[in-house]
Image (tube, helix red, strand yellow):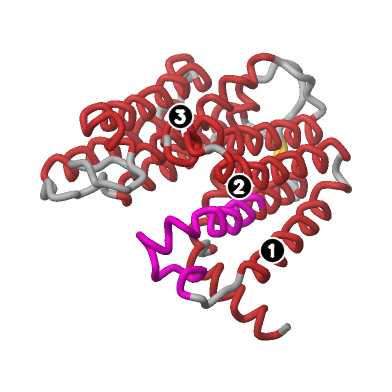
Amino acid sequence: MSGTVRRLYAFFAERAPARVYVTYAVLWVLALEGALALVEPGDARWMLGVPTLAEIGTVWLALLFIRVVDEQKDLGYDREHNPGRPLPRGSITVRELRLAMAVIAAAGIVLTVWRSPLLTGWLLLDLAYICFLVGLERWSRSVRDGIFRNLAVSYPVQALLSGHVWLSYRDATGAGPHWSAAVPVLLCACVFLHFEFARKTSHRVTPGATLYSNAIGTRGSVGLTVGCALAAAALALLVVRPWQVHGPAAAAAWLPLSALGCVWAGGERFAQADARGATWPRGPAMGFLAWFYVGLFVAALSVADPGLTV
């Protein structure tokens, strides 16, 4: 058992480093909750406390679960294109990864069941859907090989997690359901899709690689990458309405739009890169996601003025 623990620790350190996955979970939850506080009507007060920390932990565990399942789902592809990854090279086994899935699911239940049975059920639905995708890709070649079809069936995993954050926000604040919550959820979709399209956009067609540019060309893939970032910025304007903010909070209200600088930098570096298979630089794509979420959270703190609890 100790050997299994060591191998799993090494696997997560390599394939799901805490500095990336924990940071993403923290920023996603804080930004989405902040945006919800700005658009949800009523007197419910947004508070940063134990429920928020529990939700960050829940989202982080779900991200780890996704990583573990993807490693198994992509094993055939990785044997050919990424043989150095842990599963193809034999440093971890499928059985050990499935053990990790069970532990992660149990920890997720612990973090949700004391808050709301609905949160537990929603989380289990998301985890079950992630597992369903493995069978779907094995059964359907069009889903497995069609990158846009694959995105269409796999993105709901992220949407369900955003829905989980919304349900957690409702449970913590007492806010009722309202259509306005769809705007922050859509905003998060655009932020994620910018990164998704960016990391799979290349200067040229690469046979066998899972690239959006293989399907619609470089210009089309760049258009989707930039378009998603612009759509996220437009939705942030709709959520924050910085033109209505005055005083010291005004600068913070415009902060999310400054993340577009990362998109500009990424586009410049991509345009100047060697055309021999170069992809959109990962750093600016990740930078946009992180800085946008930081800006949205800071804007929400400044505009919504929530109470802070522990």
Element on which disc 2 rests? helix
- Residues packed near mark 1 inside 10 Å, few (<14), some (14 to 19) or many (20 plus): some
What is the C-alpha distance between the residues marked 2 and 1?
A: 13 Å
Query: From this viewpoint, is residue 301 visible?
Result: no
Please identify the dominant SS of the magenta region: helix
Q: Does 52 appear in magenta?
A: no
**Which of the numbered marks, if any, corresponds to residue 107?**
none
- Residue 237, image x, y percentages: 45, 20
Residue at numbered disc 2: 134
Residue segment shown in magenta = 62-89
Residue at numbered disc 1: 98
Residue at numbered disc 3: 190
- Image quarter for residue 1? bottom right
Q: Is residue 298 left or right of residue 160?
A: left
Task: Please name the residue shown 50% across and 62% down the image.
Answer: 19
Mark with earlier residue (2, 1): 1
